């Protein structure tokens, strides 16, 4: 994998929300590939972030794809609304969905790419039946719901397991593997070495003095 193959999706939770449009433009000019947007409902995870109106506002400014991760306890009921509001990639949690395959089909029918995420303690094997219906698997390398946590060293093995499962099913080319939480040049290198395609990073990019350098450094952490 060359650095041009690595996608970097800066997490908008680390942006300055008083100047969000400027932040979006800044991060795009610095080389971001996607915008990672964490939706938290205060139920599935303890924190509360934002919903559809903010997604629509971001979509009105962004020129890069919106990579929306809904950490909500009712994805089957609300997912379509996030696609309609501008999500290009929509990732939901397998633990929260009543019927992951049916929901994946709904999201695709609405025109978005489909992702699934799972908590660090959820067995990878739980994805086996739904994997052919997906475009992306998001591996959480921290417990979902909070920023600024340290990278869990169990994550690389989970990335490798998903890559192996997709390869065995003959769909590795179809599935992008994203990793989110505690990403820095060292953990990025480890994640990419085990099969990750997309790096989600918050403070490592938005908090950097030179955002272009931060993104380039992550892309080259192979």
Image (spheres, rainbow, N blue to C red):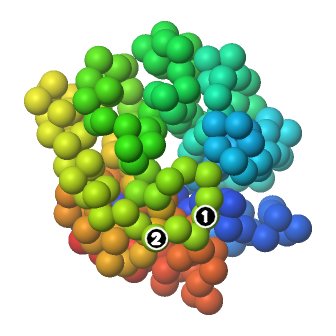
Outermost residue on the right side: it is: 18
- Identified at 40% across, 48% down, the residue is 120
The answer to whether residue 32 is visible is no
- Determine contact: label 1, label 2, CB under 8 Å: no
Q: Of all residues shown, which one is farthest toward the left?
A: 168
Residue at 21 percent of width and 53 percent of height: 157
- Viewer-proximal residue among 38 and 217: 38
Give the residue pinned by disc 1: 147
User: How far apart are the two marked residues, 1 and 2, measured between alpha carbons?
Assistant: 9 Å
Where residue 75 appears, x then y in whole percent? Answer: 62, 24
**How would you rate the neighbour count of disc 1 (Cα within 10 Å): few for under 14, some for 14-19, many for 20 or more?**
some
Nearer the observer, 150 or 165: 150
Q: Is residue 183 visible?
A: yes
Q: Is residue 144 left or right of residue 154?
A: right
Quarter of the picture holding the C terminus: bottom left
Residue 171 placement, left or right of 95:
left
Instruction: Name the image quarter holding residue 1.
Output: bottom left
Secondary element at tag 1: loop
Q: Helix, strand, or loop for circle 2?
A: loop
Identify the mark at residue 150; answer none if there is no mark. 2
> Residue at point 45% right, 43% down?
119
Percent of width and height locating residue 219: 37, 70
In the foreground, 28 or 179: 179
Q: Position of residue 36 (x, y in %)?
A: 59, 52
In the displayed structure, does residue 62 sit left or right of residue 126?
Answer: right
């Amino acid at each position: 994998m060359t650095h041009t193959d690595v996608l970097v999706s800066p997490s908008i939770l680390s942006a300055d929300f008083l100047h969000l449009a400027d932040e979006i433009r800044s991060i795009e000019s610095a080389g971001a590939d996607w915008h990672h947007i964490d939706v938290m409902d205060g139920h599935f995870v303890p924190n509360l972030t934002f919903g559809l109106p903010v997604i629509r506002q971001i979509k009105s400014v962004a020129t890069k794809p919106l990579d929306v991760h809904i950490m909500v306890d009712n994805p089957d009921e609300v997912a379509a609304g996030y696609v309609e509001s501008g999500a290009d990639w929509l990732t939901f949690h397998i633990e929260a969905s009543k019927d992951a395959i049916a929901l994946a089909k709904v999201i695709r029918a609405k025109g978005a790419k489909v992702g699934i995420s799972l908590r660090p303690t959820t067995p990878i094997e739980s994805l086996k039946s739904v994997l052919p219906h997906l475009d992306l698997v998001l591996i959480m390398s921290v417990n979902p719901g909070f920023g600024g946590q340290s990278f869990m060293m169990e994550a690389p093995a989970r990335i490798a397991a998903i890559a192996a499962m997709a390869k065995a099913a003959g769909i590795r080319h179809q599935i992008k593997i994203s990793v989110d939480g505690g990403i820095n040049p060292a953990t990025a290198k480890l994640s990419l070495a085990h099969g990750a395609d997309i790096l989600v990073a918050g403070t490592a990019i938005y908090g950097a003095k030179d955002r272009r350098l931060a993104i380039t450094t992550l892309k080259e952490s192979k």
